[in-house]
Amino acid sequence: MLTKYDELLCHQTVSTFDSIETSAREWTERVWVVVYDTSGESLLIAGLGMYANRNIMDAFACLNIKGKTQYNVRASRELRPAIDEVKVGPFSYEIVEPLKKVRFTLGENDYDLSFEVDLEGTMLPHEEVSQVAKVRGRVLENVLRYVQGGKASGWIKVKGKRYEIGKENWRWLRDHSWGIRRGGGVPESGVQPGEIPIGYLHNFSFMQFDDFGISHHTRESWDSKTLLFSGAVFYPYGSGKEELPLINVEHNYRFRPDLRRITGGTLVFNAVDGSKIEISMRALAFCCLKPGGYFGHRGFVHGLWMGPSYLDGYKLDLTDPEVVREVSFLDEVMCEMHCGDKIGYGIIELVIVGKYPKYGYQDWEPTADPSYISGNVASDSGG
């Protein structure tokens, strides 16, 4: 089937753009954005995913206000024949200027949340190293991604009240990924179960200062051995500076006593030129991503067939400890960052499952399901 993309001189396979190079049903292409007020009052996370071999496109938005209330809207549709329309119900994602500016919109709906945000890049995009993993000879993960940050403008409307977004104190980051990712979405049936890890750590960060940014992605086994690392220091457009690759990170986080969610900490990055960069941070806001489809909540999970057209939404009271326990797992934490006398802002994504003695965790949390976690966290954390 021809689409408007087939007019472009950029084919790389002997096929049209409606087909993927593999028949793997887990092939996913996803965009994911975080928009936040540097005061920590509002944290918006939204994403949109295409599953070419499942014939599905879905989208979500989660807005946390003052850490007390979270609004969630989710949508899904049949992908074809509108495979070249990046829209799902009231959601739309528009590339205004490639690698520089995008617009994410959630139109009016019945669930008290809508927005239109323009995300203009101030930093050069950072391309992570490939994330490739096999289990028993089978590809578990084969993903490429890039991340970028900048300043946001536009508006958010909640329960009829409109909030203006200005570049002075609103920041954003986005993640664009594509490839095979077996995890976080619809579980496979009739296959050999994955191995349940003793313990595992996944950590992603993205931070912005006035004259530089840093992003890293690391995964570790229960005994703090590095399984994967990618990271770099990058600079604003027009700076003329090349990326500075990072070799590794030393993390020392502080946690809430009741949840595996950080309240602050330090990151020390070691760069290829021998320099060290130390970042200290304190948490200002958070957003829980399970309602957005990461690992699933109330019947919605990424890549699940919900029929030709689906839309729902709801509000969460995060002052209720039971609600927090239900939805907290993959949480984005917005932090104020300090590097020497420089102040910046950014996002920390941290998931620890099972045993991880460095932070005092000796076993699985009572509410965790190890059989579900197996093979899922590595391939579906983050965007």
Image (cartoon, rainbow, N blue to C red):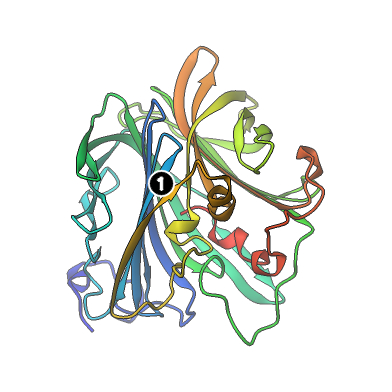
Quarter of the image for residue 157 reads top left
In this image, 73 relative to 193: left or right? left
Tell me if residue 59 comes above or below residue 278 in the rendering. Answer: below
Q: Residue at x 50, y 64 (%)?
A: 296
| Image position, residue 126 (x, y; %) | 44, 43
Instruction: Specify the amino acid type for callout 1.
Output: Gln
Name the one closer to the observer, 251 or 7.
251
Tell me if residue 242 comes above or below residue 290 in the rendering. Answer: above
Name the one closer to the observer, 19 or 88.
88
Q: Do we see residue 108 in this rendering?
A: yes
Q: Do we see residue 125 in this rendering?
A: no
Residue position for label 1: 70
Label 1 crowding class (10 Å Cα cut-off): few <14, some 14-19, many 20+? many
| Image position, residue 311 (x, y; %) | 30, 67
Tell me if residue 329 comes above or below residue 4 in the rendering. Answer: above
| Image position, residue 110 (x, y; %) | 23, 59
Tell me if residue 136 comes above or below residue 336 in the rendering. Answer: below
Tell which residue pokes out farthest to the top in this image.
341
Helix, strand or loop for disc 1: strand
Q: Residue at x 22, y 80 (%)?
A: 81
In this image, 358 relative to 323: left or right? right
Quarter of the image with the N terminus in it: bottom left
Name the one closer to the observer, 69 or 95.
69
Q: Residue at x 23, y 70 (%)?
A: 84
